[in-house]
């Protein structure tokens, strides 16, 4: 199907849905909606950073803030202190 045909089908499907369902579906489609994808090799720091950057590029400010909070909460105390020092060094804290 062409992009125009796909758009027509999507529009028809949205119009056929009850109001709240159509709104929620369209909102989900327009928002990034990406879930964080784990890297193939979690030990490869470059791949981990690349995957995180890809996700962050499409995330909303609320998603970014939530991810940052839970990431820091999940760090071991020593890692958290090291991360805080890095933020200060970069002038971000």
Image (cartoon, rainbow, N blue to C red):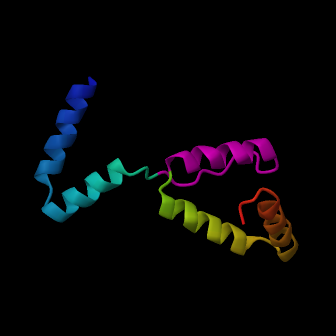
Looking at this rendering, what residue extends furthest in the front direction? 91
Q: Nearer the viewer, residue 17 or 48?
A: 48
Q: Is residue 40 visible?
A: no
Query: In the picture provided, is 29 more to the left or to the right than 83?
Result: left
Q: On the picture, is 15 further left or further right than 80?
A: left
Range drawn in magenta = 34-58
Give the left or right position of residue 60, taking residue 17 as reference: right
Q: Quadrant of residue 74 in the image?
A: bottom right
| x and y, in percent, of residue 42 in the image | 76, 51
State the residue at coordinates (58%, 54%).
36
**Residue 53 magenta-drawn?**
yes
Location of residue 45 in the rendering, given as x and y in whole percent from the top left corner: 80, 47
Does residue 80 appear left or right of residue 22 in this picture?
right
Give residue 88's quadrant in the image.
bottom right
Counting the numbered discs, the total is 0
Image quadrant assignment for residue 57 = top right
Is 14 situated above or below 64?
A: above
Up-down relation of residue 24 to residue 29 (above or below): below
Q: Position of residue 71 (x, y in %)?
A: 68, 67
Residue in the image at 59% along x and 43% along y: 54
Which quadrant would the C terminus be assigned to in this image?
A: bottom right
> Looking at the picture, does residue 41 appear above or below residue 68?
above
Residue 48: image location, x then y, percent: 73, 48
**Residue 39 can be seen, yes or no:** yes
Quadrant placement of the N terminus: top left
Residue 30 in magenta stretch = no
User: Which residue corresponds to the image point at 78% horizontal and 56% vertical from the top-left?
Assistant: 90
At horizontal 49% and vertical 64% (from top left) the residue drawn is 62
Identify which residue, 93 or 77, lies in the foreground: 93
């Amino acid at each position: 199907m062409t992009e125009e045909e796909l758009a027509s089908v999507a529009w028809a499907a949205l119009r056929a849905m009850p109001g709240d369902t159509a709104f929620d579906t369209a909102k989900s489609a327009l928002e990034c909606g990406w879930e964080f994808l784990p890297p193939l090799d979690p030990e490869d720091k470059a791949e981990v950073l690349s995957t995180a950057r890809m996700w962050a590029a499409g995330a909303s400010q609320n998603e970014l803030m939530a991810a940052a909070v839970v990431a820091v909460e999940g760090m071991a105390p020593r890692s958290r202190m090291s991360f805080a020092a890095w933020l200060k060094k970069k002038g971000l804290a």
